[in-house]
Amino acid sequence: SSELNQEKESDDAFIGKSLTTTLCKIGPSLVHSLRNRARNDDKATVRRACIVAWLEMLSLAYREDQGFGISGLDISALCTLCNDPSVATRKAAAEALTKLIIDTYDSDEYSSQASALEFAWAHTVLPLVSDAEVSCVTRAIEFFSKLIIDPIVDLAQDATRKLSTGGNSRYYVAWRILSKLSDGDKEAGASRSGIGSLQTAIQKLFINAGNDCKTLTKNLLQAVYKIGILSLGIDNHASQHDLSSPNTGEFDEDFFERNTAAMRTGAWCILEALTNCLVNSSEARTGANISLKQAVRSSAIDCSFVVLSLKKLKELGNSVDISPANKATLAATSRNCLKVISKIGGLVPLKDAKKCSSDLMQDLKSFSLPNDLIPSTISALVAFTKRICNDSGKDVIDECDEWINALLDRCECAIESWLSSLSRHGRIETDDERLLTRILFCIGELTMVGFSSQQDTLQPRTKSARDMVTDKEPVRGLIVRPSNRLIHLVKLMLPTTMPITSVNEEDLTPT
């Protein structure tokens, strides 16, 4: 009996090997056929079955190290199928992309295909958390937990050791996917991509966690805090020292090594989404059963790290040795950091809040910030103003009104100075264009502080406007009007009509 069993096992192994060899020989043509059938067949059941078989062939190619492994055509097709009309097909395509990423865990090299897979997952699988079909949402949340949340939560304890030992690929994959979410979130209002999808996924995860939500939130905050300070080379105890001399850590040697950069970008990406979820849940009393303040205190993180991180990001961004691509990434991360500060600024130690507030005010006065950082900088200033006023007893709206008007005066003086220079030299330099763009952008953002759809902007601010103030919107209802002189100066720089949309257009639209 034993000999018969051994003989049967030997025969099965031979048959299995022969089948694998045969499949590998016809692999390229079979993958091509399955891919086309999955994309074009009229029957949803056939499309789904083709995806399953197609995935098995790609996994076989990876295991056997064959030349017909996953290609750009495969990734593109699976992305398309994630938006298929059939629910079963969408779920099968999402599962295929997830499994293909997990297959890369064992790879020693980071290929262009792996990078493309991560980007595809971030922008086609994760958006399924907003799918109209509940079963699709459930699967997407499962994949999100497996690829992103579980590895990150695991880093809440002993992160440095886990990142430096074998089997750490799943951690880096999670951060790289998050970094690609941040990179792709370019369009305002993109609720089904980027930060919007991430925030929706976290919100649904909180709901599913139920009573375990507090523990989940605590572990997430601790993990993101540790990765944030590691990826910027900030020592755990740096927040107890002077902000002018932050300590550096073990990642100081290369801030732009692929995984280090991904951890830094990904950490601030998920922290922005996480703080948004906690603030929104507290306001609406849905989702997480814990407020942002409770979560921060429970996790025992030192909120000084947000201002230390912002300072380090600014130092790196101002370095002459940084490439334009890295500067753009740092700017995006700085924007996320400022958005986090706008939510968590009230928990930053008073000394740090005052110092950072002063630095941000100076950045705005000097017009040194790029346009995409101006709105988040102003929001962070509002948060710090509230933090400082809570200690001093001053009115937040009055204090914000004061520095907003001071900045508008600064804008007015800068425009007048430029007009005077223009009259002398008779030309506009490239630096002048950049300066004027920033000034105009700053004016627009400053006048929008406190804007609320429930406030009639044609009426002067009254005491009722203060009744609109909430913890989330501490200056809601505030209206600051630019001076008549500033409005006149801005109009001087604008054309009298809107750009024409066609050569035959006769009626010009005034600006």
Image (cartoon, rainbow, N blue to C red):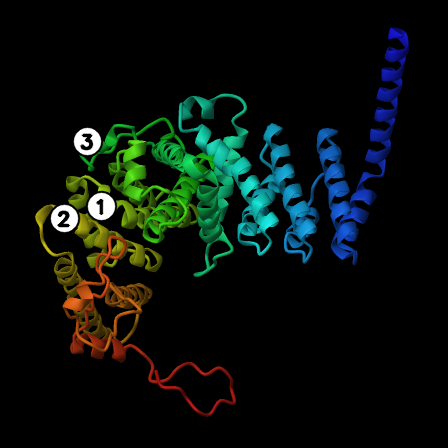
Amino acid type at image mark 1: Gly
Viewer-side label of 1, 3: 1
Query: Vertically, is 380 above or below 109?
Result: below
Query: Vertically, is 93 above or below 57?
Result: below
User: Rounded to the nearest whole Å, what is the CA distance between mark 2 and mark 3?
Assistant: 24 Å
Q: Are marks 1 and 2 in contact (CB under 8 Å)?
A: yes
User: Rounded to the nearest whole Å, what is the CA distance between mark 1 and mark 3?
Assistant: 20 Å
Amino acid type at image mark 3: His
Along the line of sight, which residue is nearer the eye, 315 or 59? Answer: 59
Tell me how many marks there are: 3
Q: Is residue 443 left or right of residue 20?
A: left
The residue tagged 2 is 390
User: Rounded to the nearest whole Å, what is the CA distance between mark 1 and mark 2?
Assistant: 9 Å
Q: Which mark is residue 346?
A: 1
Query: In terms of sequence position, does the residue under pointer 2 or pointer 3 come before the other?
Result: 3
Is disc 2 placed on a helix, strand or loop?
A: helix
Label 3 CA crowd tier, 10 Å (few <14, some 14–19, many 20+): few
The N terminus, quarter of image: top right
Q: Residue at x 89, y 19 (%)?
A: 11
Query: Vertically, is 179 above or below 416?
Result: above
The residue tagged 3 is 241
